[in-house]
Amino acid sequence: MRPERLNPLFATSAGLKGVGAGIMRPLEKLGLTRVRDLVYHLPDRFVQRRAVADLDEASVGEQIVVRLTMREYRAGGSARAPFRVHAEDAAGNVCALTYFGRNAGWARKQLPLGESRWIAGRLDQFGQTLQIVHPEHVADDGAVALGTLCEPVYPLSEGLTQGRIAALVGQALAQVPDLAEWIEPGLKARTGWPDWKPALLEAHRGEHKLARDRLAYDELLANSLALMLVRDANRARAGQPLRGDGHLRARLSLPFALTGAQRRAIAEIEGDMAQGSPMLRLLQGDVGAGKTVVALEAMLIAVEAGAQAALLAPTEILARQHHATLTRMAAGTGVTIALLTGRDKGRQRESILMGLLDGSIQICVGTHAIFQDAVAYRDLALVVIDEQHRFGVGQRLMLTQKGQNSPQGRRTPHCLAMTATPIPRTLTLAQYGEMDVSRLDEMPPGRQPIDTRVVAVERMDDVVGALERHLATGQQAYWVCPMVRENETVDLAAAEARFAQLQVRFGGDAVLVHGQLRPEVKDAAMERFAAGQARLLVATTVIEVGVDVPNATLMVIEQAERFGLAQLHQLRGRVGRGAEKSTCLLLRGEALSEVARERLALMRETQDGFRLAEEDLRLRGGGELLGTRQSGDTPFRVASLEQIAELLPLAHDDARLLVERDGGLTGERGEAARQLLYLFERDYGVQLLRGG
């Protein structure tokens, strides 16, 4: 149960004054559905203004607050001309307060002739006249106006204004309770961080680095602590020691020798699976580094030991692909591998369920359908999760609870998670701190490097011509259009328009896939491409182009400067999977930022995903347009990338100290830390302690 003190923070935003259905929609878009969300909706920046006695003290272009007396209204000759209020400062200087659009009535009401008002805004010059266009604040009271000297600028969505969001944040902050301190006292004294509640108030009032750092640290500490509790709870569980004798693995007919990195990872996994506590290991491997072989070796260890294994894929297409690959690789072993997805119905489904229950099916591959309540295993001892980032810690825990009731009592299966997204070391700790990590950082022999070129968008006709020649050879190609969340509808229209143009040229050879198609339509298009019936797949990146089509040897990425390095690298990795030479064309727009230029140069220079991930983190330190918050590749809302890099090691050590020295979640600091876990919704850490 969430501590009662926190209840005001988890009340819905709809309960705040002035929030109706119309305001709730843009709030939902920003994820601001509760008081807590508003409290942590921190300003992007601050407008700094200076109070001046008269305009002689100010410079053109400066943000100021000044007291002016209204002298004259001047309406323009046409409906489109601006409405101006001529006003005078204490020294007799004249300044025009200028309003565009149909604002005359409102301006007359706010600025009555002969009366004085405090005006906040940017001082500009039009011809010989000083002016303030659309004053940002007009106040009768000097104290109110002076309160705008340092004004927060919040992230907005359509339908919200700065004034409205600032008022809602103000209401939310008024409901913040006092909470006991969870940061280790020595660390807090060393850093000079304020207490939690003052830090929240300060962070909304100005550029207070200490306050922002403290709040980021709280989030990182909650995350580290939760992952540590998960890890410790996992180690305390009963697992099933699995030792294979190698007789099945010896029968594997692999087309290539294993790399040193693969052999090392297999040895680490084998060591973990032989232990009495369940394995919790992450296998990080670049696209094409051979994770599937490692997973198969792990699953065969389980089967050799007389148990079953299951592989979970995030989509049906990936599940089918894994099933085909594993069946081909394990052909000589005699192991039974079944595919179970949500599509399977009737007798076929019944027969798979019976096989899992009686143990005649030794390996099961599928989507989350393999973990539904109706699916029972005779002896499930290993769960492999592919594309780990699609499943949160909570889901990982749910899956491993599908363990078996062995004669020795309930056992937790071993868990091997896999990801093809190379993650910088700092973020690995942040996202997978509860796991041991194996990295496949060598490429299998015989894989040809992908020829990567940057092409200006003006050469579009040449690119389409090259695509036509490419398809004429019988090979296939991808064409990826950007999908950046800020303006999904425009991006989607652009993708559909590009598809329409290419379809005129290539007819039924082209198929379109994007995230807003019905799943069965999307799957049908992907299957046509995978089977070679369609030769060009036009897609947005909302779908991970997860199909493995060795015959696809050309990748065109449009507006490549809009993507992060990690994303470009993932997309490029869709080609270069067969024996033929592959090419990746990065189409760039005209205006390139310095960062975009460096990104594209790095893509040309290297195909090492781990190096690109580290460079991506460095380039995105400033959290620019495609920064982490939008593309969702860190689990944090408050902490920026720089703060993660700087503060995460501290948070990790502090969490370890709390768990090992300070009695975990018992004792005074532990009680405060429990509140912290609930505050950042990492309370699965608490639940584990409670129920296991």
Image (cartoon, rainbow, N blue to C red):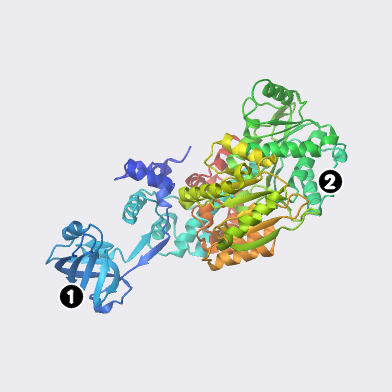
Q: Whole-Å distance between the Cαs marked 1 and 2?
A: 87 Å
- Image coords of residue 21 (percent x, y): 33, 41
Name the amino acid, label 2: Pro
Closer to us: 536 or 408? 536
Residue to which mark 1 is pinned = 90
Depth order, front residue of 206/468:
468
Task: Check contact, mark 1 vs mark 2: CB within 8 A.
Answer: no
* Residue at the (40%, 50%) spot, across then down: 38
Dot 1 lies on which element? loop
* Residue at point 71%, 57% (across, down): 450
Q: Which mark is residue 255?
A: 2
User: Quick one: label 1 or label 2, which is nearer the N terminus?
Assistant: 1
Q: Tag 2's secondary structure? A: loop
Residue 301 in view: no
**Please, what is the three-letter code of the amino acid marked with disc 1?**
Ala
How far across and down, in percent of the image, does residue 469 sit?
68, 54
The answer to whether residue 443 is above or below residue 515 is below
Vertical side of 31 occupied by 193: above or below: below
